[in-house]
Image: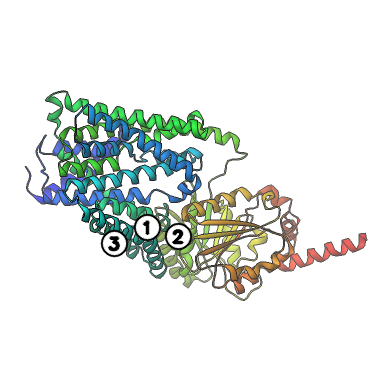
Amino acid sequence: MITNSLLIVTIILLIILVVPILCEKVHLPGIVGLIVAGVIIGPHALGWIGRDETIETLGKLGLLYLMFMSGIEISLSDLQREKYKSMLFGIFTFTIPAVLGFAASRWVFGYDLPACILLGSMLGSHTLITYPVVSRYNIQRNRAVSLIIGGTIVAVTAAMIVLAVIASVARGHMGTWFWVRMGIGSVVMLVALFYGMPRLTEQVFKRFNDSIVEYTFVILMAAGSGVLAWLAGLEPVLGVFLAGLALNRQIPNLSPLMNKINFVGNALFIPVFLISVGLLIDLHAFTQGWSALLVAALMTLATILGKWLAAWLAQKSFRLSRYQRQLTFGLSNAKAAGSLAAVTIAYYLGIFGDNVLNGTVIMILITCAVSSFLTEHAAKHIALEENDAEAEPLQPARILIPVANPDNSGRLVELATFVTDRSSSLHAMAVIRQPEERQQVERMLDQVARISAAADYRMNLHTQMAVNISNGILSIANAEQITHIFAGMPEDEAQGFGKALNPLLTTAPQGLWLYHTLQPLKTITNVRILAPEHAEKESGYNEWRHMVARIIEQTQADVTQEVMTSWAVLPRIADSMAENDLLIVVQARPSTVSFHPDMMQTGEVLKTAFRERNYLVIFPQLKLDAQQDNPFFSEFARHNESSFALFERLHNKRHQSKEGAD
């Protein structure tokens, strides 16, 4: 047995580095690979590393971190989308495998009642380990996906509650005081987690724009939630899981904070936990008789059969297609986090023996393999069906962020990462008007690149020598084939949207997004969209709708949409907006079908009446054919004058022609 702590750490880090790479090459789940690696180096095989106090402590921390991440990755807004159907499916997918597991453990294995209940609940839970397949095929909005995510919340929460109660019973904490303590403590914990913690988190995120402070605060909240569960006489894993659910809305999936949480967990804590599970497993149990293999076989069979029956009932109850049923079965079949949490805690408490521990590893391996195959097959067919129904696929966005004010560059990067996926490209640029400005400009661009890297996005940096800022922006936009330009809302005294941006409305066909915010986008709870009549007939309609939908999905904000027939009422809307509201104002270029003359005053109104509000102005992308047909653009190409002067001249020309016709 190795006793040198540095050598032990080196071996563990080597396993964490190499094993996932090898597993990916042979299409084996990394979770299983790390557990098997723990078995190989553990006391029952090579005997290199024993399960000492340090490994045990790190393993428990990894378990808590794993359950926190499981909660934080489950979106409560998906439960709202198909609320009652999701809850019913959650009952199906938890109860049926739980009953089968209870029956097998009671009448085949002869386990006692607490072990049977816990084993059944362990089979009823599942982990969305193949959800990245859904994201890759872009079918997150499919009904079957909404059902399974909502059902996952029900199944995993039920399994964690059963685990907490059975573990307390196993410790001998039964009695009147136990139930009183658990009842009162549970109420206090739920109020603190789902009422107090989100509000406290929101205030911290608004006051401290520091990634380290945000990460430390979130981990502190998770640890405190575990303590609250412990004080209530429950297992800390239930507390940290519920903390993840409670903080889900404040931590979007594509945010830099979520990236840090995933990085630390996947790079250290969770792999150490999985290796520590492997150290417990004794493979000799499989050679000492048929009992270990029988337990593994029945656990796996009960899981697969139970999850298939739940998916079949969902298909009949909710009229799902064959591939939707297959997707539901595939996503709900895999075992990982919940099962490992339950079997590890139960093994420590003596509820389960070696057979169940070893059988759980075999079950995880088989269910993950089955889940991967079925999810891939079903997702591919569903994506093909949905693509056939869509009129035109959207091209990856290429977003340009002109950097002029370091104070709002971080907010613009945050907005860009919210509305794009990994297939899109981000660009930041700055205009250099004097040679001595180059050093300061490069420092600003480096800051933007660091902010983008924190969210795991690569930022392409550009500089442009130009006397005129709008010409410099347009030059980079055309050279890099930019589809959208994201800029901060200017506060200068110029008419409309400022000296630098006004010309872009007439010379740049790219979508133009002007952003004014007082707080991080992840703290927004309500989105209000104002769009003009006939907005759906504009060439860039699908693009901005898709990107705004991603904002709503990431923030899980409530949304209202209004069609504006009169823009004169815009100033009054400011009074009805709350602190965490975001107003999205969709505009149109002159001479386009949805343009209204009142829009010429929108910039002035926003800069005055909405100074203390969050808002986003969107000028949709103008496709090439639409730009060529637009008389405003063709007229501007022949005259070197401002957009507002040109609009005034065209408006007067049309008015005179109408009078002549009369």
> Mark 3 and mark 1 in contact (Cβ < 8 Å)?
no
How far from the left and from the top, in percent, is residue 446?
Answer: 41, 63
Residue at 41%, 52% in the rendered image: 253
Q: Residue drawn at (52%, 71%), measured in percent from left and top?
A: 434
Which residue position is annotated with label 3? 220
Classify the position of the N terminus by image quarter.
top left
Q: Nearer the viewer, residue 553 or 9?
A: 553
> Which of the two residues, 240 or 105, is positioned nearer the viewer here?
105
Q: Amino acid at mark 3?
A: Leu
Q: Residue at x 25, y 26 (%)?
A: 297
Nearer the N terminus, badge 1 or badge 3? Answer: 3
Classify residue 53 as left or right of residue 557. left
The x, y position of residue 120, in whole percent, is: 28, 36
Q: Which mark is residue 522?
A: 2
Quarter of the figure with residue 588 = bottom right
* Amino acid identity at mark 1: Leu
Is residue 417 something one can see in this rendering?
no
Left or right position of 585 against 135: right
Q: How is the image coloured?
A: rainbow
The amino acid on which the numbered mark 2 sits, given as a three-letter code, is Lys
Q: Nearer the viewer, residue 427 or 543?
A: 543
| Residue identifier under label 1 | 257
- Please rate how many residues cluster around mark 3, counting C-alpha atoms within 10 Å: few if below 14, some from 14 to 19, many from 20: few
